[in-house]
Structures are given as C-alpha cells and as structure tokens.
Image (spheres, rainbow, N blue to C red):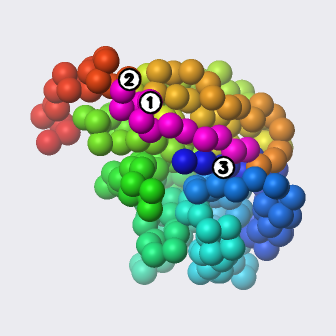
Amino acid sequence: MKIAWLQYDIVWQNPEKNMKILEEMLESSNESWDLLILPEMFDTGFCMNPDEMEGREVEKTIGWMEQVARTYKCAVGGSTSVRLDKGTFVNRFVYVDSNQLETYDKIHLFSLSGEHEAYNAGNRIRSIKHSSGLVLRPLICYDLRFPSISLHRGELDLIIYVANWPESRIDHWDSLLKARAIENQCFVLGVNRVGRDGNGLSYNGSSAIYSYDGKTLLGSQNQSGVFVQKIDISGMKEYRKKLPFLIDRRVTAEEN
C-alpha cells in the first residue's frame, strides 16, 4: 500500500488559496497513492477564531476532499474546524474515499493556545478501515502527548497524527512519533506543516512515517512537497509474531 502526505506552508485563514496550492502540488507529482493525508486544519492554519472567518464553508472543504479522492482514486484525510448545530466548533479529522466518510474529533485540546475555549473536545476514539483492509487510527497533534488513546491489542496497522507542531518543540514530535510506533508495533505517520502562521509561530515540518520497529522509513525535513512511501503490512504481522508484546497488554479500569 502506498501512503502520501502533503507538507506545505498553510496560508492563514484562506481555504480557497490553500486548496489551490494543494491542487498544484498534487498535479506536479508523478506518483500514485492509495491514501493521502493533509496536516491539521489544512485549509486555515491552527486558528482559535473559527467563527470570525468570513465566508468560510466547511462543506466546500469536505467537497474538495471528496473531489481529490475521486480524481486520484484514493482515500483522503485531514483536519478542519467544523461548526456543530449549537454554534460551537470541533477540530475534526475528516476521512473520505469512494464509499465512506468517517470523522474523529480531537480529544486533547491544547489549552496553552486557548483551543479549549474555541473548540469542544471529542470523546470517542475512532478506527477506520481503508478499502485495502488496512485499519488506521486518526489522531490530532496534541493527542500525541497522551499515548493511552493510541494503544491497541493488534487490531491497528497505521496510526496517523496530523498536526501544526511548532519548531520550538520539534524534538518532542520526533521522539514521541517514534515511541508510538515502537510501543504499538505498527506504522505511525506524522504530518506537520512548514512556514509561519498568523500567530507568529514557526514550523519546520519533520513529517515522517515510522515502521513497526521504530525505524524512519521516510522523512520530509523542512521541505514542502508531496511525499510517498510504500508500506508492507505482512512484514509487520511477522514482526508481531516474533515479538508478541501486544498480547501482554492489560486494560486498566480507567480505560473501561
């Protein structure tokens, strides 16, 4: 299975321009892929005033994702801010392919930025089955610091973290992604952004995919572009048979 991700400088609060940039990046690639992943809040940047973005319609963003999925015959995932019926917002990972639309709402909100005041926290972990049979778990940025929601007993093949993770703490990003791969014995993909956002924060990317034994398969460093990596699920299954750590995990009362 081939997994692609886009790392780029997100234009602050400008969905139309961001989608145009993404289209040009995709058109310039000679690769093909089965799954395409975009960063956290890929259409606006990590903004804490979603109700003040004049003219923004999340339906257009999701419709654009669906069009990309049709054009490139792949599944597409990424996070965006979504208004709920009561006028509140969630930071939602949206996954679309030819026959399904799945979502995950960010559980751990980054209080240092005021995310907990602008968004509602999710309360449900999701696992999504790709048409190839691969089972993935989408998580968002700050979720990476809380390993309990990534743990499993062998049912997951890929854990995805989409993020706007700043350069000042990028060493944490690198270390925690690798740790999640080792402890879960599965592939882990972290998709970040580059550039500077409207709050003045700098981002240097470091998007990467790690194998089930913690090895870096492909990293993006601080470059913009489309990055593609093929993964081998059969090798992961053999590795788990050889080192069956996952079956020894005990579920705590807190998780029940």
Q: In this view, does 243 lie to the left or right of 248?
A: right
Amino acid identity at mark 2: Tyr
Residue 181 in the image, given as x and y percentages of width and height:
46, 28
Q: Which of 59 and 180 is in front in this view?
A: 180
Asked whether residue 130 appears in the rendered view, the answer is yes
The image shows residue 123, relative to residue 152, as above or below, that is below
Give me the C-alpha separation between circle 3 and circle 1.
20 Å
Residue found 44% across the figure and 38% down from its top: 233
Report crowding for label 1: few under 14, some 14 to 19, many 20 or more residues within 10 A (C-alpha). Answer: few
Comparing labels 2 and 3, the label whose residue is closer to the camera: 2
> Do the CB atoms of the residues marked 1 and 2 lie less than 8 Å apart?
yes
Q: What segment is highlighted magenta in the picture?
A: 227-238
Q: Nearer the viewer, residue 187 or 60?
A: 187
Residue found 39% across the figure and 54% down from its top: 133
Asked whether residue 92 appears in the rendered view, the answer is no
Residue 54 in the image, given as x and y percentages of width and height:
73, 78
Report crowding for label 3: few under 14, some 14 to 19, many 20 or more residues within 10 A (C-alpha). Answer: many
Residue under numbered circle 1: 235
Q: Which mark is residue 239?
A: 2
Report crowding for label 2: few under 14, some 14 to 19, many 20 or more residues within 10 A (C-alpha). Answer: some
Amino acid identity at mark 1: Gly
Q: Which mark is residue 127?
A: none
Q: Residue 4 carries which label?
A: 3
* In magenta stretch: residue 235: yes
Which sits earlier in the primary sequence, circle 3 or circle 1? 3
Residue found 55% across the figure and 63% down from its top: 75
Residue 223 in the image, given as x and y percentages of width and height:
83, 38
